[in-house]
Image: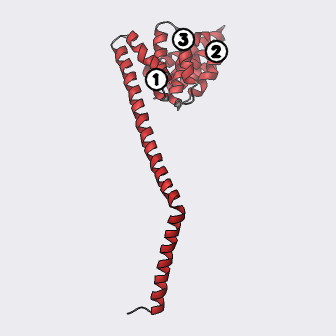
Amino acid sequence: MTPNTDEAFLREVDEELRRDQIAGVWTSHGRLIVGAIVAGLLIFAAVLGWRYWNNSRAEAQAVKLQSAFDALAAGDAAKAKAPLAELDDASAPGYRAIARMTEANQLAQAGKTKDAVAKFAAVAADTSIGKPLRDYALVRQTNIEFDSLAPQTVIDRMRPLATKDSAWLGSAGEMVAMAYLRLNKPDQARAMFKTITESENVPDSIRQRAVQGVDAVDVGTTDQKGK
């Protein structure tokens, strides 16, 4: 059916008005619209460029770390020093942490315990690094300087990591138990050793030492009571 003449006229007027409004907006704000589009494209290009640059840099750091590992695997510790030293200040926290801990392990093997402890301590205190790496660094730091630390310091430092659901129960718990023995607290030491023996996530070697620790504490306690 042919639409009503008034309706057709009003529709044409409405469409014409919209075209005029669009034209007016473009006339008044056309430059701003073009500028916003260009700015958006530039930002998008910058983000893509930054991602490419960041990935390229991370790839270069990975190559350096691998070259250090290859040198160490070949028994050439001297060759590994340069790439590890360059990664000491790497932008990627993970590569930086692994490089520093690798250096620390080399220093510990060479008998330079103070330098090794300092390296591990730096990693443990770096909040930009993931907690698993920081926890590992703290365990290694404490292990290396165990004999020079006050027993209570060892307990305070390792007790949070010596829980049943902790990945570090074996290493941290063993040090906590030994620190309790140094404080002449056999009951706490026995409880810690027992927690280690009951965990299936602890390596067999550490769990076996914990079993021996429980037996040793029981014998020692019996001897003290006998006296």
Look at mark 3 in the image and give the residue it sits on. 115
Look at mark 1 in the image and give the residue it sits on. 98
Q: In this view, does 131 lie above or below 111?
A: below
Look at mark 2 in the image and give the residue it sits on. 151
Horizontal placement of 199 versus 52: left or right?
right
Location of the C terminus (image quadrant): top right
Query: In front here: 57 or 167?
Result: 57
Regarding mark 2 in the picture, which secondary structure is present there? Answer: helix
* Residue 79 screen position, x and y as percent: 38, 12
Quadrant hosting residue 69: top left
Query: In front here: 198 or 68?
Result: 68
Regarding mark 3 in the picture, which secondary structure is present there? Answer: helix
Amino acid type, residue under disc 3 in the picture: Asp
Amino acid type, residue under disc 2 in the picture: Pro
**The furthest residue to the front:** 27
Q: Which of marks 1 and 2 is nearer the N terminus?
A: 1
Give the spatial CA distance, label 1 vs label 3: 16 Å
Q: Which of marks 2 and 3 is nearer the N terminus?
A: 3
Query: How many labels sit on residues?
Result: 3
